[in-house]
Image (tube, grey):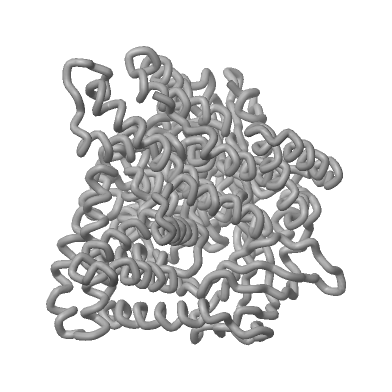
Amino acid sequence: MRLLDLPAVMPAVAALSGAAFVASTDTRSLPLLSLLLAFGVALRRPVGWWVACLAAGALSAALQIPPPDAFTVDPERPVEAQVALLTPWKSGAYGWSSLARIEEMRQGNTPLREPVRVWLQIGSRESPPPTAGRLRVRGYLGRRQAFRNDPTIPPGTWHLTVKSRRLLQETGGAGLLLRSSRLLRDKVEGALDSFSQESPVPALGLLRSLLLGDRSQLPGGWLRALRRCGLGHVLAISGLHTGLILLFAVGVGRLFPRYLRIPWVLLVLGLFVLLVGPRPSVLRAATMALLAYAALLVGRPPTAVNALACFVLGTVALEPAVVTELGFRLSISATVGLLVLAPKLAAHWSAYGSAYGSAHGSLPRRIALPLAAAFSAQVATLPFSVPVFSLMHPLSVVFNLLGLPWIAVFLAAGILWVFLALLFPPWAAATLPVLEVLAAPAAALERLPAHAAISLPVVSGFAGALALAVLLLLAGRWPGKIGLPALALAFVLGSWGGPPADPQLVVFDVGQGDAILLRSAGRTLLIDGGGALGGGIGDRVLLPALRQLGIRRLDAVALTHPDADHCDGLLELADYLPIDTVFSPSRWRSSECVRHLEETRRISWRGWNAGRIEVVGEWRLEGLSPEAEGRDVGHNDGSLVLLAQVRGIRVLLTGDLESSGEKRLLARFRKLLSSDILKVGHHGSKTSTSERFLRAVDPRWALISAGSRNRFRHPHEQVTELLGRHRVRTLRTDIDGGIYLSIGPGGEIRHGNLPELR
């Protein structure tokens, strides 16, 4: 049995590889690429055509995508751009967004080499933006910052943010596709919103995610639960949804005469594309369906792999920038797994026995095929998903076997419910409880405990993830021979290192937020977990950083106060790492953050107020503020303030404490505040770190956690100048990245990267 049909897939793979290589490097030698194309055509053999496709993909990218280092922009100055909308506007919790292609752009009087595709965002919930296909906009161009811990998380996608609709000017009418899509989308959104005005309905939030790709009303716990179980792909509008829609259409189409069935299926497919917008993944699936239909019209059997190859080649030729997008890579690789790998594995398992390779009993095809499909899709996406998400999902095959039928049933019921909501609202209100019952499994997944069998943190680049995927694929084919090496490599990539010899203090780079780790003698305490608009700090940033430190569980987390930039990352992290205890000041126990950790994740809570002492390995930590029953203060001045001591070194951790809170500390503990290291309060805000307070602490080191180019302009120059006058050595996450400190046996403080401190 051959696992790959190379002649069928290699031209598309070659074109993709050429475009991806050029898009990620500075290579732009058009004569050399043209010569390579001519050489491939001259060979004529299969290898020659593969070379020609490789050169053609590279040429297309070289002509349409600027080099990575050719683009510079000042994110603090506005740009003016002419953009063409690629998808209809999508409403969210923070405004409107649409995928757009920049046609020309300038900053002031300087023309800029633009990124080809950006997310155009309007940061307000005003009336819907215009439906014009082309717009002249004035806004700020930037991208989510890189997080420079070990490992570094690269920058995110480009966003062009416009503060108000008044800064948009129509320059070209919308095409029929965008206008129709907007009209249909408005109708469906209006029907969903009419039932969610008084209070959010989680089931409708799930339906909105599946139909419209809008997750703004999906409960955060449900979103994280689906992701950690390996079901996050069901929320990304893709070929899966197109396939389910087609399955629904074919089922209903059986009620029609034979000559009407294919037009009916194509009508449903077209309406779905209009509803979700012309996304690349949906267009791929729709194109494959249309090519299959065309094959039937000319009397030839449709071949899905050929349809996929045609779509890939067309995409690379017309829109090569899409090859750099993670969603496109995951969609194409998963489809290849389903079309190429799954049938061969299913046939092998059915013919020769169980998944363990036994020849004494065969696996029924109705079981082998879905099992092979789930396994193949996961293996095919590993080289792209692991470097970005730093996760494997060992049980995702099981979750997908159970979850995809559930999603199919829920989506079919949801489509019928939307028809009722549009045509007979009273009937929709009466049947809404049925939809809520069908959505209940999402709530059950949310309550699953954090375990490596569900989500295994793995830190690896593309090469390591590709090697793991190949070994897992070969293990599926020859489990007795390859299974052990595959498991060994998975263990190496996901293994945990031992504890460090000396106590460590780590201030993670989490952008505009706080996340501080204290560890010693195998014991760990994480103080705050950061948080950001759009999420992802806990699982995308902290989880791989903790994995790199060799941490597989946290003995405790401490929440200084429940602001989003301190708490949201803890909520995400608790879904992936076991946590024994959550500490917080007593006043914050009723906060949504602590209640979720205590009730949903079943983590025991303990109050930590002024006077309480806890020991973490060699670290001794004493609470200085707030009082258990003190005066009513705001969030920042109600922060948990800790004095940590180890090997004669004193560290003062102040949360987001401001000047009024500092005055209370000075009144109570002036002689006890002297410390070697100060974690500067409130990210270096000018409302914190007063002259009197700094004199009392008299630190040698100051640590500041702040986001690069953050909108609050933290740390304030007043604070950094004050630290400079006092000759305090200052480390900042916005400049230095993650801050790794180690305390030696004699109390010496060492600062360096992770390999240097091990």
Residue drawn at x 41%, y 78% as measured from the top left? 185
Q: Is residue 242 left or right of residue 50?
A: left
Q: Is residue 729 above or below residue 239?
A: above
Q: Position of residue 346 (x, y in %)?
A: 30, 32
Where does the N terminus fall, quadrant-wise? Answer: top left
Residue drawn at x 57%, y 55% as measured from the top left? 512
Quadrant of the image occupied by residue 222: bottom left
In the depicted view, which residue is nearer to us: 262 or 186? 262
Q: Position of residue 94 (x, y in %)?
A: 49, 71
Q: Is residue 124 left or right of residue 409?
A: right
Q: Position of residue 334 (x, y in %)?
A: 44, 44
In the depicted view, which residue is nearer to us: 694 or 333? 333
Q: Residue furthest front?
A: 299
Q: Is residue 42 left or right of residue 381?
A: right
Residue drawn at x 34%, y 71% as measured from the top left? 263
In this orientation, does residue 151 appear? Answer: yes
Q: Is residue 473 above or below residue 605?
A: above
Where does the C terminus fall, quadrant-wise? Answer: top right
Q: Is residue 617 above or below residue 146?
A: above
In this orientation, does residue 697 appear? Answer: no
In the depicted view, which residue is nearer to us: 390 or 6? 6
Q: Position of residue 6 (x, y in %)?
A: 52, 33
Residue drawn at x 54%, y 51% as measured from the top left? 310
Quadrant of the image occupied by residue 380: top left
